[in-house]
Amino acid sequence: MQPRFVGRLGVADAVTTANAALGFLAVVTAPSNPRLAARIVLVAAIADGLDGVVARRLGSTPAGKHLDSLADVASFGVAPACIVVAATGNTWQAGAPVGIGALVVGAGFVARAAVRLGLYTAYDTGHEHTEGVQTTLAATLLAAGVL
């Protein structure tokens, strides 16, 4: 007996899943090496663009748009927030204002990314344009700023 998802995911979904895995790698790398984590976010941005190309060429699955938003929350919401906190030297632990500020900004960044991606998946996937700043762009700019 096979798991029920076998045969339901496509090649583009595999690329999207790689994006999510890169987000995880950026999160765990950020505390020890924020610059490497920023580079990983940039590679995730490439994977995020590539999954759309692959979906248009080889076809997409009904799960694709949902997987994409989930992966983007990890790679372009949580990972950049962790990089910001790590780039401050985790000074929040000592109660430093800059560290506390990084925590607040990071939490807000994650919350906004999750809401934006949820709204995009619910309302914009069928349209030619989207409203608001893409999370990929925001995270890419943040990562480039760290580098």
Image (spheres, rainbow, N blue to C red):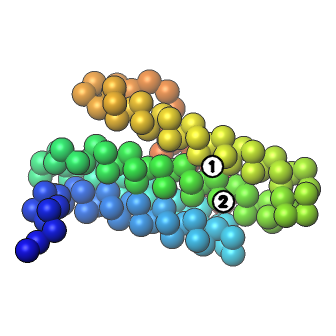
* Residue at (28% x, 53% y) in the render: 51
Residue 46 shows in the view: no
Depth check, front residue: 11 or 8 = 8
* Residue at (32% x, 57% y) in the render: 16
**Which percent across, then down, holds residue 128?**
28, 25
**Which percent across, then down, holds residue 5?**
17, 61
Quick check: 133 left or right of 63? Answer: right
Pick the quarter of the image with the C terminus.
Answer: bottom right
Depth check, front residue: 146 or 73 = 73
- In the image, residue 15 sits, relative to residue 59, either above or below, namely below
Residue 82 shows in the view: yes
* Residue behind mark 2: 83
Secondary structure at badge 2 equals helix
Secondary structure at badge 1 equals helix
Q: Residues within 10 Å of mark 2 (few under 14, many from 20)?
A: many
Q: Residues within 10 Å of mark 1 (few under 14, many from 20)?
A: some
Q: Quadrant of residue 80?
A: bottom right
**Which percent across, then down, holds residue 74?**
48, 55
Q: Residue furthest front?
A: 1
Pick the quarter of the image with the N terminus.
Answer: bottom left
Q: Amino acid at mark 1?
A: Leu
- What label sits on residue 131 in the rendered view? none
- In the image, residue 9 sits, relative to residue 134, either above or below, namely below
Q: Quadrant of residue 21?
A: bottom left
Q: Quadrant of residue 22?
A: bottom left
Q: Amino acid at mark 2?
A: Ile
Dot 1 and dot 2 residues touching (CB under 8 Å): yes
* Residue at (63% x, 49% y) in the render: 142
Sequence-wise, which precedes: disc 1 or disc 2? 2
**Which percent across, then down, holds residue 127?**
28, 24
* Residue behind mark 1: 142
